[in-house]
Image (spheres, rainbow, N blue to C red):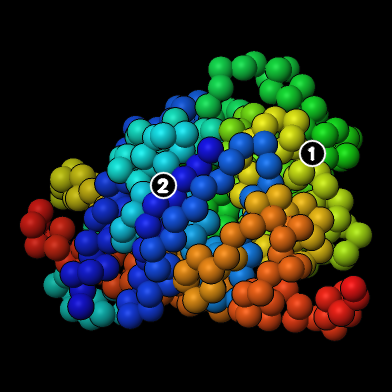
């Protein structure tokens, strides 16, 4: 049952990466997508990141009941959990909702209103024209969003810790700067790129093969978010297992 | 000229097209008519490659379209203009950008030349000055006319129209029909129109192919259609009271 859609997905990707008709047109579309996905998602990513860091700090402090464990550990835990898990994964899940549903409904609407047929009649490789700029836009901007998210998450953690008195400023900074493993950042970026690819391609696939009308466009959009989220979590586990 | 030979198309257990062979000549308006579900739109989609026929061939001036791969088809596709039932204008682009889109993709013209061509096409469909409007700001008839302007932007050799009158009032329908006929004669295009609008059939039907249950049932002109003794065609043509009244007149 899974093999038929998987085959269609692979064939769609093959068509997406066909040589573009005119790079200039594609370039314009790529910049539009980078603006929509990157700049357009900055606000929501900033808000959730600050709270993610803050919650991590407060909850870690709550669990540190032993006097044998120094408070500076909190800084290290916020740093590592932000870099390795919270920023890439939670950001990706939020983006699956925001960007994924938009991609699926946009392409789905184009399908049911025959706009994709119009592209094909003109001799344009419609998967390439519609999906490739979204993939490039996402894989270039989502890692940047994740970097911003890591930064803001740590700031959120620092503020929550120091303002609530859970950890002193000095302890937090000591924890933050001790025992940093640069490879964790590489893992985070690998996750970000993979998640960006999943969000755009899964959503575009759902939209591209929509048939029917407005109801089906809505269903495709919902499916896109659900399948993207599950795929993100599965890939998250896979990357963690393979790289760590 | 477009020739189809023994076109077959099946969706699951539903045999939609049953060996349709037809010839569509240049410079005249060729109509494909038939009741709902008779296979008209599927036949049109098989001709332009939106559906792959299960069997048979589609020849564009001797070039076998059905045997071509994606890259080889591009050459023929740049010679095709198509007007869709819902116009299929790109929502994110204004009228001017919609018309210039195929020029941007497939020509090396500079912006000024492309703009001149877009303006010429808009004037041709009596929409001069509407360049900056978006599809959401257009009426149904205007959308159809922009669709025609976009279809003729590349000087097509083959023009396909899927239900060009659907959703339009009778007066606007006649304007669209006449526009398609004028363009066909002016550019000597091979024009194929899918319709079930009897005004179009009687007004611009120079060569008419009637489909019934996925088969070619009858072929002729608008002059011959009124005097045919084909029962299925008569049922279709004289379904309305108005047409029945016309039939009874000596």
Left or right of B210, for residue B243: right
Place of residue A14 in the rendered image (x, y in percent of width and height, measured from the top left): 27, 46
> Residue at horizontal 54%, vertical 33%?
B79
| Residue B58 marker | 2
Vertical placement of residue B8 versus A214, above or below: above
- Name the residue carrying label 1: B182
Residues behind callouts 2 and 1 on a single chain: yes
Quote the CA–CA distance across marks 2 and 1: 26 Å
Quadrant in which residue A112 is drawn: bottom right
Q: Earlier in the sequence, mark 2 or mark 1?
A: 2
Q: Are marks 2 and 1 in contact (CB under 8 Å)?
A: no
> Residue at horizontal 41%, vertical 34%?
B62
Q: Secondary structure at mark 2?
A: strand
Vertical placement of residue A213 versus B210, above or below: below
Q: Label 2 neighbourhood size at 10 Å, few (<14), some (14-19), many (20+)? A: many
> Residue at horizontal 64%, vertical 44%?
B191
- Whether residue A199 is visible here, answered yes or no, is no
| Residue B1 marker | none
Q: Residue furthest front?
A: B250
Image quadrant holding the C terminus of chain B, namely: bottom right
Which chain does tag 1 point to?
B
Q: Secondary structure at mark 1?
A: helix
Place of residue A91 in the rendered image (x, y in percent of width and height, measured from the top left): 40, 61
Q: Nearer the viewer, residue B13 or A126?
A: B13
Left or right of B118, for residue B50: left
Vertical placement of residue A5 versus A143, above or below: below
Place of residue B29 in the rendered image (x, y in percent of width and height, measured from the top left): 69, 47
> Residue at horizontal 38%, vertical 78%?
B14
């Amino acid at each position: 049952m899974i093999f038929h859609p998987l085959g269609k997905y692979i064939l769609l990707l093959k068509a997406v990466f066909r040589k573009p008709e005119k790079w200039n047109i594609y370039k314009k579309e790529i910049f539009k997508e980078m603006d929509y996905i990157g700049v357009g998602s900055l606000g929501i990513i900033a808000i959730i990141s600050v709270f993610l860091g803050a919650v991590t700090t407060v909850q870690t402090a709550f669990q540190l009941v032993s006097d044998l464990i120094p408070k500076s550990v909190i800084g290290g835990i916020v740093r590592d959990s932000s870099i390795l898990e919270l920023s890439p994964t939670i950001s990706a899940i939020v983006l699956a909702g925001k960007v994924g549903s938009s991609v699926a409904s946009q392409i789905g609407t184009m399908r049911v209103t025959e706009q994709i047929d119009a592209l094909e009649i003109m001799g344009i490789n419609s998967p390439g024209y519609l999906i490739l700029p979204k993939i490039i836009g996402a894989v270039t901007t989502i890692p940047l969003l994740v970097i911003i998210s890591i930064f803001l998450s740590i700031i959120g953690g620092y503020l929550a810790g120091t303002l609530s008195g859970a950890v002193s400023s000095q302890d937090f900074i000591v924890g933050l700067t001790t025992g940093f493993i640069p490879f964790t950042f590489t893992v985070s970026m690998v996750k970000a790129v993979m998640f960006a690819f999943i969000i755009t391609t899964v959503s575009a696939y759902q939209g591209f093969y929509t048939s029917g009308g407005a109801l089906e466009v809505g269903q495709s959009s919902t499916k896109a978010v659900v399948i993207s989220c599950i795929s993100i979590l599965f890939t998250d586990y896979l990357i963690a297992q393979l790289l760590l | 000229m477009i020739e189809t030979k023994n076109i077959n198309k099946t969706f699951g257990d539903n045999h939609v097209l049953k060996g349709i062979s037809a010839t569509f000549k240049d410079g005249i308006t060729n109509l494909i008519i038939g009741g709902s579900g008779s296979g008209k739109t599927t036949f049109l989609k098989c001709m332009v490659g939106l559906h792959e026929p299960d069997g048979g061939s589609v020849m564009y001036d001797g070039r076998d379209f059905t045997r071509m791969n994606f890259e080889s088809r591009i050459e023929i596709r740049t010679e095709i203009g198509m007007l869709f039932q819902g116009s299929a204008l790109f929502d994110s682009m204004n009228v001017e950008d919609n018309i210039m889109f195929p020029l941007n993709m497939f020509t090396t013209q500079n912006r000024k030349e492309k703009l001149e061509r877009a303006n010429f096409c808009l004037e041709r469909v009596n929409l001069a000055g509407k360049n900056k409007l978006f599809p959401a700001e257009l009426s149904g008839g205007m959308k159809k006319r922009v669709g025609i302007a976009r279809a003729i932007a590349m000087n097509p050799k083959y023009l396909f129209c899927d239900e060009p009158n659907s959703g339009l009032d009778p007066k606007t329908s006649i304007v669209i029909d006449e526009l398609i006929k004028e363009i066909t004669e002016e550019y000597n295009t091979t024009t194929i129109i899918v319709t079930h609008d009897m005004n179009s059939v009687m007004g611009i039907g120079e060569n008419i192919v009637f489909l019934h249950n996925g088969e070619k049932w009858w072929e002729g002109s608008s002059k011959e259609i009124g005097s045919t003794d084909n029962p299925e065609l008569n049922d279709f043509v004289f379904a309305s009271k108005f047409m029945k009244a016309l039939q009874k007149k000596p």
